[in-house]
Image (spheres, rainbow, N blue to C red):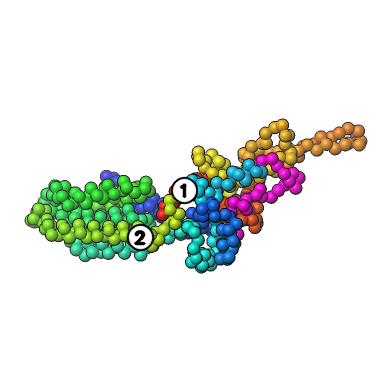
Amino acid sequence: MKKFFTVFVPLFIAALCLFCIYAFRLKNETSIWKNYRVLCVNKDAGEKNVLTRLESAGIYDTVTLSNQNPLGESEICPVVPFSQEYVQAFSPFFFDESGKYQLYYLPVTVDLNKKLEKLFSSDTGGWKLENVTTLSYWILLVPAVIAVFFFILSRKKFLFFIMQLPFLYLCFFSPQFFEIAAVVLFALIAFYIQHFFKKPDWIRFLLTDPVFLLLCVIFLILPFFSGIKSFLFIYGTLLVSACFFFLYYYSYQKSSVIKYIYITSAKTAAFSLRQKSEFLFIGLCSVLILSGFFFMKGKIFSSGGLDDLSIPCPKEYNGVVDFSIDSYETLVASRSEGCLADLGDYVAYKWKKDVYPFVSMNKEAPPAKKGTSVLYRHYRENTEEKRIKVSEETVFTFNNDYVTTKVSELDQSKEATVEKLLFEQKKFMAVCYTAVRK
């Protein structure tokens, strides 16, 4: 039983960490908003002038501020007193947080890139276009070459392989600067460990080697300069590598009753000063090359050409891809302070507008909550009994059918509105101002 847990626990921890890295991997998203690209123009440019230039380049159906209007007016009550308030709630979608720039949402088409090239071939007066986010896997050649290089030099190749493999797994699913830099640094650390493994006094020697300690300190500090996701990824991968090392060590201890002792001590097998300098030089050059790749504007990663502008961005609250009433209520409950209007506000507006003719003007409209119903009284004359007969009819019920029906109306709509943009995300999601990286 003890042997079972000794093997099972490290394997379980390693599998859990690797699964989390895969589940929360960096995905290849085309833009901030699915099926749309964000164009940022100084608000003094004038919307009419901007649309004229877009249409001259063949770009139509742009979601703009002037296109916003209450969708689907009621036949019973064409005018409602709260329609303008609803339109104004969505106006922040068309400005950055500072209010200096106006935003235009360009629908993605097959030939949009060609049209944009035509548009930006002439002077646009400082227009800023959101670049697409793409994963450039060829950048993985850098950590791969480093790993292969030290693998060839390794004496205990299998030990180096199992320690380095989790980090190669990490940079494949999250090919970002800090992750790949960690892979390069850990290749040097793993090479050191395998070289001195099981030599007499090897642990004490490593803990007093200044180059090894320097590499470890840099590796452990590096994640603190990254985001929380990269931080967890790097330390989670380090935990996986430690689990694999433990299993290797455990297997080594159990493989034979006779234990062979190296005659050569760790101190005798130490790298020369020249070798240490070469290793540090390789690591430093690799990190500098990676820095050049990642910070060369628009070459490897371009998460936006909006120069750190703070613009409306989707903020997912869960992974449910539907427009059910449960997702609607989860959205409403998850809204935080500072969130902008969203598709939940559209559903609530449709409900308020639908029930408006059937509710007393002296009362508040019934809330857009699950199970809420609106009754309508019918007064009919009963000629036989010679009196007025009263009956009640449920005209609206806020349930799953109501929510899905109202949202599905956007699928048929030809209007270029922000509600249509939100519908294209295929799920309810909150919207907040977020700074876009260069």
| Residue 101 is covered by the magenta coloring | no
Residue 111 seen in this snapshot: yes
**Quadrant occupied by the C terminus:** bottom left
Nearer-N-terminus badge (2/1): 2
Circle 2 SS class = loop
Side of 263 where 412 appears, left or right: right
Percent of width and height locating residue 170: 34, 55
In the rendered structure, does residue 70 fall within the stretch colored magenta? yes
- For the point 23% across and 64% down, which residue is it? 149
Q: Residue at x 58, y 58 (%)?
A: 49
Image coordinates for residue 265, horizontal then vertical, percent: 9, 54
User: Residue at (20%, 50%) from the top-left corner?
Assistant: 214
Q: Position of residue 351 (x, y in %)?
A: 66, 43
State the separation of the CA atoms marked 2 and 1. Answer: 22 Å
Place residue 286 in its image quadrant.
Answer: bottom left
The amino acid type found where label 2 is placed reads Met
Circle number at residue 310 = 1
Amino acid on which the number 1 mark rests in the picture: Ser
In this rendering, position of residue 339 left or right of residue 414: left
- Magenta segment, which residues? 61-82
Q: Is residue 51 above or below residue 68?
A: below
- For mark 1, does the 10 Å Cα neighbourhood hold few (<14), some (14 to 19), or many (20 or more) residues? some
User: Which residue matches tag 2?
Assistant: 296
Q: Is 298 left, or right, of 360 in this rendering?
A: left
